[in-house]
Image (cartoon, grey):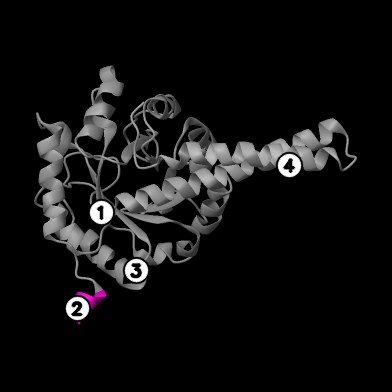
Amino acid sequence: MVSGAIDNRSDARSMCCTLTALLNSVVAESGLKRTDWQNAVAKFSGLIENVWMARASLEAIRNAAPAVLPSLLLCDFGDLKGEVAKLHDAGARVLHLDVMDGHFVPNMTYAMPIVEGLRRHTDMPLDVHLMISDPLKYAKPMVDAGADMLTFHVEAVRNAAETADLIRQMGVNVGVALNPETPLASLRECLADIDMVLVMSVEAGFGGQKFNPIALEKLRTLRSEFPDLLLEIDGGIDATTIGPARAAGCDLFVVGSAIFKKHDYNSAIKALTDEIAANDPPTTGEEN
């Protein structure tokens, strides 16, 4: 298995096992029926493990930022394990998966089996972008398959804050995405309930589009108003657009063609990370 920044995934499981044993010993002396307390302990320990795992993966994503996230839509699915290993060796620490349903967007891609297969091969955080009409229908199966971050589209739901809260209760980190023509005001009600905003620089689900600079304006506004919120960008990201996105305050950069259509993943990711470093926004101290 390819290890990533989330080495504390196993630590979380170990702590949950310890906690479960402690709870078992305490509750066994309480006089409750054996089946009652066993069910209660199992449910509680499962919840605690999910919370710890979510926090561990979010910490890993934050620690990786600013980071290039390879979008696996263009990878060689005939050698998924090999692709993951090559990407990790090239410096990737978080992987991005685009899930499309043929309804919210016209294209269709993969679903839970690919997420589950990836989880067997790597401990790197899996950032799953749900470009689907009913994110709540598939959120729990995605979590069970191994997703660490689930991002749904604000355009796909009636109540973004409620959707975010329900997904978070499944024990996963939550992001919300918006298309270029969707105003930032549509996010206001849910910003307190999410871990990340994904700013689309092309319309979701359509190929061959040019990078829309309106995404940079949104990034600058979000960074100014929410300095601790993770910001991600997706669509048309390459060596010419990744620098301006970083300068606008972006943390995570979803990249497809600029990695997978190159012969050497190492040099491709290095070129992108060099552009990120060259465009780091100044810190508060540097501005004064």
Question: Looking at the image, which residue sits at the far bottom?
Answer: 288
Which residue is under mark 1?
66
Q: Find residue 195 and report its horizontal and vertical position in percent.
A: 43, 56
| Dot placed on the residue nearer the N-terminal end, 2 or 3 | 3
Measured in 3D between alpha carbons, the distance from the residue under mark 2 to the one under mark 3, in whole angstroms, is 15 Å
Q: Using a 10 Å C-alpha cutoff, classify the residue at mark 2 as few (fewer than 14 neighbours), some (14 to 19) or many (20 or more).
A: few
Measured in 3D between alpha carbons, the distance from the residue under mark 3 to the one under mark 4, in whole angstroms, is 39 Å
Q: Which segment is the magenta one?
A: 284-288
Residue found 46% across the figure and 50% down from its top: 174
Q: Which of the 4 image quadrants contains residue 42?
A: top right
Badges 3 and 4: C-beta atoms under 8 Å apart? Answer: no
Q: Amino acid at mark 3?
A: Pro
Predominant secondary structure, magenta span = helix
Label placed on residue 23: 4
Q: Amino acid at mark 1?
A: Pro
Measured in 3D between alpha carbons, the distance from the residue under mark 2 to the one under mark 1, in whole angstroms, is 20 Å
| Dot placed on the residue nearer the N-terminal end, 3 or 4 | 4
Residue found 37% across the figure and 33% down from its top: 102
| Dot placed on the residue nearer the N-terminal end, 1 or 3 | 1
Q: Which of the 4 image quadrants contains residue 19?
A: top right
Horizontal side, residue 287 vs residue 38: left or right: left
Badges 2 and 3: C-beta atoms under 8 Å apart? Answer: no
Which residue is under mark 2?
287
